[in-house]
Amino acid sequence: MIEGKTVLAILPARGGSKGVTRKNLREVGGKPLIAWTIEEAKKSLHIDKLIISSEDDEIIQVAKAWGCEVPFKRPIELAQDETPGIEPVLHALKILPQYDYVILLQPTSPLRTVDDIDACLEKCLAFNANACVSVAAVTENPYWMYTISPDSIMHKLIETNNYFTRRQDLPKVYKLNGAVYVAESEWLRKNKSFLSNETMAYIMPWERSVDIDSESDLFNLKIFLSDYSY
């Protein structure tokens, strides 16, 4: 609870991932990938209820073993490749409508910390925002990117009168890192997205913004963890 408001945290974890087979259960640093998120979320000062949304019996059992609640099994029709990511969240809010705020924590962001989770929520309330999501600075700035026409002519991706010759002069640009999504529950039911022209940004460092979307991502994470102690 925070400022008298109740908080529901949701871990979406379907079994049919394609980029990394059974990625939510893959071992990373001696434990299933999903356990990294569960452990950090359980340390939160504000989360009242931490649940998993999954259609997969094995994932459900592993989540339970690591201390995550499973109040329902996700309908199979909400666990398809083409299912929009917001649908499992809206489904959970229908079953558990009593919470003032909802946090979406994707298991594919294992290096996000409890400090990131709580700070994103705290920022949302401090600014009386409807939503706040985590972002990270891009490593390749789009102001130095081009499209190429059929006749091989280069065109600026972002049209501007400025010509930036030094990296230090480039405008700062950020991207969603997928780690933390926070929203006021009723607003989210109406907006059906965490993103709008009202959404605030919580900036996370690049080293904690790992997003597992491929086998190479998983391999690189294991290498990273073998070099550094977490």
Image (cartoon, rainbow, N blue to C red):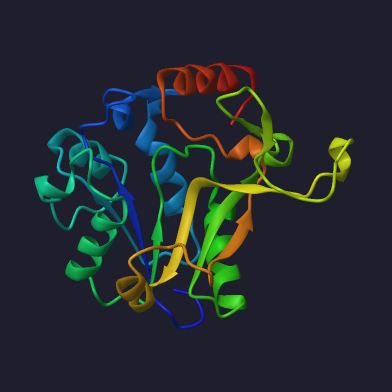
In this view of the protein, which residue sits in the foreground, 183 or 175? Answer: 175
**Which residue is pictured at 36% across the width and 71% down the height?**
191
Residue 64 position in % (x across, y down): 24, 44
* In the displayed structure image, the side of residue 136 where residue 109 appears, left or right: left
Vertical comparison of 72 with 199: above or below: above
Quarter of the image with the N terminus in it: bottom left
Q: Residue furthest front?
A: 151
Query: Image quarter for residue 146?
Result: top right
Q: Give left or right: position of 67 versus 42.
A: left
Residue that appears at 63% across and 22% down: 152
Q: Nearer the viewer, residue 16 or 192?
A: 192
Residue 35 picture location, percent across and down: 38, 37
Can residue 139 be seen here? The reply is: no
Q: Residue at x 17, y 67 (%)?
A: 95
Q: Is residue 210 visible?
A: yes
> Picture quarter containing residue 183?
bottom left
* Residue 114 % position (x, y): 53, 52
The relative height of residue 179 versus residue 189 in the rendered view (above or below) is above
**Furthest-left residue in this view:** 76
Q: Nearer the viewer, residue 29 or 145?
A: 145
| The C terminus: image quadrant | top right
Image vertical order of residue 189 relative to residue 14, above or below: below
Which image quadrant is residue 229 in? top right
Question: Residue 90: x and y, percent?
Answer: 25, 64
How many marks overall? 0
Q: Which residue is rendered at x = 59% and y = 21% of the image?
A: 224
